[in-house]
Image (tube, helix red, strand yellow):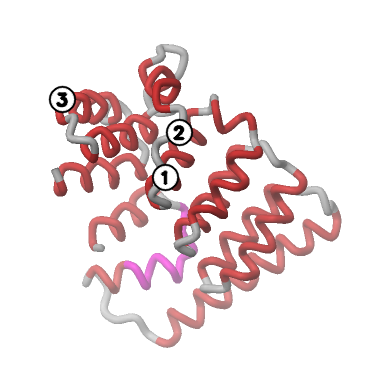
């Protein structure tokens, strides 16, 4: 938990009050006061209000809807978060950011089929390494055999993408390879993922190293 909290502090653009709460959880700030929690809620509601106004001006602004969903999830309002993401997907069904946001929500709700439903509808999820990774992760959570395994490996091994773009996919393939008992292949994908890892890939790499 502490590792995940540190990754949030180091790599994510957090609301100031949320940063204070995480620091307190790490023992690097005094305590989580009612004021800090209240400030976090106030800032979050203000951000939601800002995105609502943007959507009133431009109802087709898929990114604002997706951002609003993120803030709702901060508050634990997952139903509103889901509604906002469904609105975003209606406007941008193939947008990487929107689809990854829905995948994260599905994982958080322990409903991988929800994320898979939208990913499968998008042809981009077969060729975009960021979305291929999300689809493999959700399928694993749902207990479904890896989809398009050879194609996924081909994408991860391709020189047509930057190392950072394939870091999460490589980490996911390492996990699946380790699950299948293929340690050599898992190590190869771990090495590939570690070249320029995202924060998600770092967390995945640490998980694989601890477990296997």
**Front position among marks 3 and 2:** 2
Q: Quadrant of the C terminus?
A: top left
| Residue tagged 1 | 144
Dot 3 alpha-carbon crowd within 10 angstroms: few under 14, some 14 to 19, many 20 or more: few
- Is 208 positioned to the left or the right of 102 in the image? left
Q: Is residue 67 above or below residue 159?
A: below
Q: Secondary structure at mark 2?
A: loop
Q: Which mark is residue 184?
A: 3
Residue 117 x, y percent position in the rendering: 60, 47
Q: Quadrant of residue 19?
A: bottom left
Q: Which numbered disc flags the more N-terminal residue, 3 or 2?
A: 2
Say if residue 162 shows up in the picture: no
Q: Is residue 130 above or below residue 106?
A: above
Dot 1 alpha-carbon crowd within 10 angstroms: few under 14, some 14 to 19, many 20 or more: few
Q: Quadrant of the N terminus?
A: bottom left
Residue in the image at 57% along x and 64% along y: 71
What is the span of residues highlighted in magenta in the rendered image?
13-22
Q: Secondary structure at mark 1?
A: loop
Q: Is residue 194 above or below residue 61?
A: above
Of residues 79 and 112, the one drawn nearer to the viewer in this rendering: 112
Name, please, the residue furthest toward the bottom.
34
| Residue tagged 2 | 147
């Amino acid at each position: 938990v502490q590792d995940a909290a540190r990754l949030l502090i180091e790599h994510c653009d957090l609301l100031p009050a949320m940063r204070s709460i995480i620091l307190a959880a790490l023992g690097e700030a005094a305590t989580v006061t009612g004021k800090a929690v209240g400030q976090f809620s106030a800032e979050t509601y203000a951000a939601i209000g800002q995105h609502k106004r943007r959507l009133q001006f431009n109802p087709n602004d898929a990114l604002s809807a997706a951002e609003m969903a993120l803030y709702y999830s901060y508050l634990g309002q997952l139903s509103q978060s889901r509604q906002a993401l469904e609105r975003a997907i209606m406007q941008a069904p193939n947008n990487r950011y929107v689809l990854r946001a829905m995948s994260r929500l599905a994982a958080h709700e322990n409903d991988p089929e929800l994320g898979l439903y939208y990913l499968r509808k998008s042809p981009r999820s077969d060729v975009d390494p960021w979305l291929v990774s999300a689809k493999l992760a959700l399928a694993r959570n749902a207990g479904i055999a890896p989809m398009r395994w050879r194609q996924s490996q081909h994408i991860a091994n391709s020189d047509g993408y930057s190392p950072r773009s394939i870091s999460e996919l490589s980490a996911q393939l390492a996990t699946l390879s380790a699950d299948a008992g293929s340690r050599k292949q898992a190590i190869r994908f771990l090495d590939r993922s570690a070249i320029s890892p995202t924060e998600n890939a770092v967390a995945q790499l640490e998980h694989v190293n601890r477990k296997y």
